Amino acid sequence: MRAPEFEASLHEAKLYPQLWRLLLGVLFIVFIYISTVVPLSVGTVVAMARSMAGEEPMTMFHITAALRTLQTNLAGTGGIATPATVFFALATFAGLFAGPLLAAAAFHFRGPGSVFGPFGDWARGFGTALMVQVPILAAISLVGAWIDPPTANLAFGDWLRYLPLALPLIFLQTGAEEVLFRGYLQQQLAARFAARVIWMGLPALAFALLHWSPAAGPNLPVILLSSFIFGLIAADLTEQTGNLGAAMGLHFGNNFFGMLVVAIANTITGLALYVSPSPLNEFGGMTLAMGISIVIMLVVWWITRRLLTR
């Protein structure tokens, strides 16, 4: 049986639960995403080309060089290693944040409140998840730094200057994924199907596949497993509370530490204060660290769940 809070949150989703609406909604989300990424990419390349040209007139040479530079930073083996390219990558999630909300309105006649849940409940869930997660991850980071010291990356002063933009962009990125997977998809599937394997399992599986990275090498199965478990945990918290607050808080805290505090080498390191001594594809120490992170994630979930459902 589903949690009554979740059942209540599905009221608007159940009014127009047809699968054809969901399918059109997903296609619409893809369209919105592409519609925001393309102009953002063009604008970024033009800005980079103008910077390269300096006082000279901008030519196709500068545009081509800017495009190659952006491609190298985003898809190169060294990961996303500059602040500008991390900001760009995070900003591309704007369409993914807006898309599900627009799809819910256009095809299911739902307001944003039915996706996020009541603001008071959302804020309580978001704050509780952070309150539980931050001290645990901070303690684990300190222990990890003592066992295997990370490499300094950004100067502390530069890191502080980037925070005012980095924090809302990480909120945008993590919020977009939660609004899509635990919001729109989970809610609309739950409005149509009773089986948890469908409304919890399918969005979690899609979320895991979104994290497919050949650069992970032998650690790819562990990354996919970790992402799938996170998807199930976030789905459970969404069900238990009837809102996206806890899932968004958990995701935001996780990416804050993973992008801004200690990033894994050769991944998204451009805004990190430190970088791990081992790369993502190292089989052994990094594999063990990923396994430990799964256990920590389960502990954080259990404590958060207890606090929000007691």
Image (tube, rainbow, N blue to C red):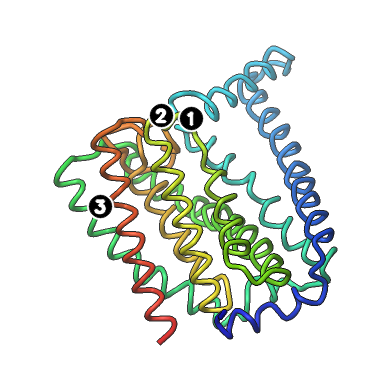
Instruction: Depth check: give the residue in front, 165 or 265.
Output: 265
Q: Residue at x 39, y 43 (%)?
A: 222
Name which quarter of the figure residue 106 lies in: bottom right
Instruction: Depth check: give the residue in front, 237 or 53.
Output: 237
Instruction: Depth check: give the residue in front, 292 or 143.
Output: 292
> How far apart in space, not on screen, are marks 3 and 2 (Cα)?
24 Å
Dot 3 falls on a residue whose secondary structure is helix
Tell me if residue 52 comes above or below residue 178 in the rendering. above
- Residue 127 spot, x, y in % from top left: 44, 74
**Mark closer to the chain start, 3 or 2:** 3
Callout 3 amino acid: Ser
Q: Residues within 10 Å of mark 2 (few under 14, many from 20)?
A: few
Instruction: Depth check: give the residue in front, 45 or 73.
Output: 73
Residue 69 left/right relative to 130 = right
Task: Tell me the number on the disc at residue 217.
Answer: 2
Q: Residue at x 75, y 38 (%)?
A: 39
Callout 1 amino acid: Pro
Please identify the residue farthest to the left as the structure is shown.
Answer: 147
Judging by the rendered image, the residue that carries numbered circle 1 is 214
Tell me if residue 104 comes above or below residue 204 in the rendering. below
Tell me if residue 73 comes above or below residue 165 in the rendering. above
Q: Quadrant of the C terminus?
A: bottom left
Q: Are marks 2 and 1 in contact (CB under 8 Å)?
A: yes
Judging by the rendered image, the residue that carries numbered circle 3 is 141
